[in-house]
Amino acid sequence: MAVTKKEIERLAWLAKLKFTDEELDELTKDMAEIIAFADTVNGSVEGLPEGASSRVTEYASLREDIVVESLKNEEITSNIEAENGFFPVRRRSL
């Protein structure tokens, strides 16, 4: 995917940034390299076993979640003046 100088100028305008022509040329080249790298990374998942998109998926599927009982709301708010089970917070003016 080729990145044009006009696209970079549009992005700069949207971000309210100003660049010289030399900076725009360099940014166009850098953005093209970034997109090429992203395309390489996206293509690197090809060839993995079906259902596995990355190594993270392998490890995540091995761990089981263990459900444990949490503290009761009354215990959590026992040492403060809770309002309907919530922590009261003062509104801060801007």
Image: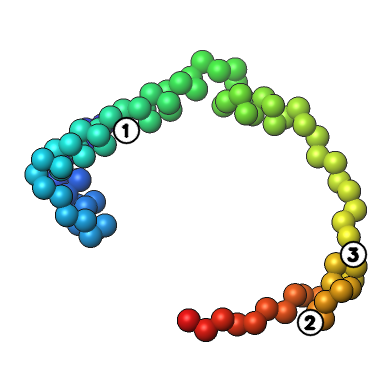
Where residue 1 is drawn, which disc sits there?
A: none
The residue identified by callout 1 is: 34
x, y percent for residue 68: 89, 48
Could you classify mark 3 by the number of other residues whose Cα lies within 10 Å: few (under 14), some (14-19), or many (20 or more)? few
Circle 2 Cα neighbour tier, 10 Å, few/some/many (<14 / 14–19 / ≥20): few
Above or below, comparing residue 11 to residue 64 in the picture: below
| Separation of marks 2 and 3 at Cα, in angstroms | 15 Å
Q: Can residue 84 be seen in this view?
A: no
Give the numbered dot on residue 83.
2
Where does residue 35 sit, x and y in percent of width and height? 31, 33
**Label 3 amino acid?**
Lys
Say few, some or many: other residues with alpha carbon within 10 Å of mark 1 (under 14 / 14 to 19 / 20 or more).
Answer: few
Q: What element carries label 2?
A: loop
- Which is more N-terminal, label 1 or label 3? 1
- Say which element carries label 3: loop
Amino acid type at circle 2 is: Glu
* C-beta proximity under 8 Å, tags 2 and 3: no
- Residue 55, position as x, y percentages in the image: 61, 24
Which residue is rendered at x = 56% and y = 81% of the image? 92
Residue behind mark 3? 72
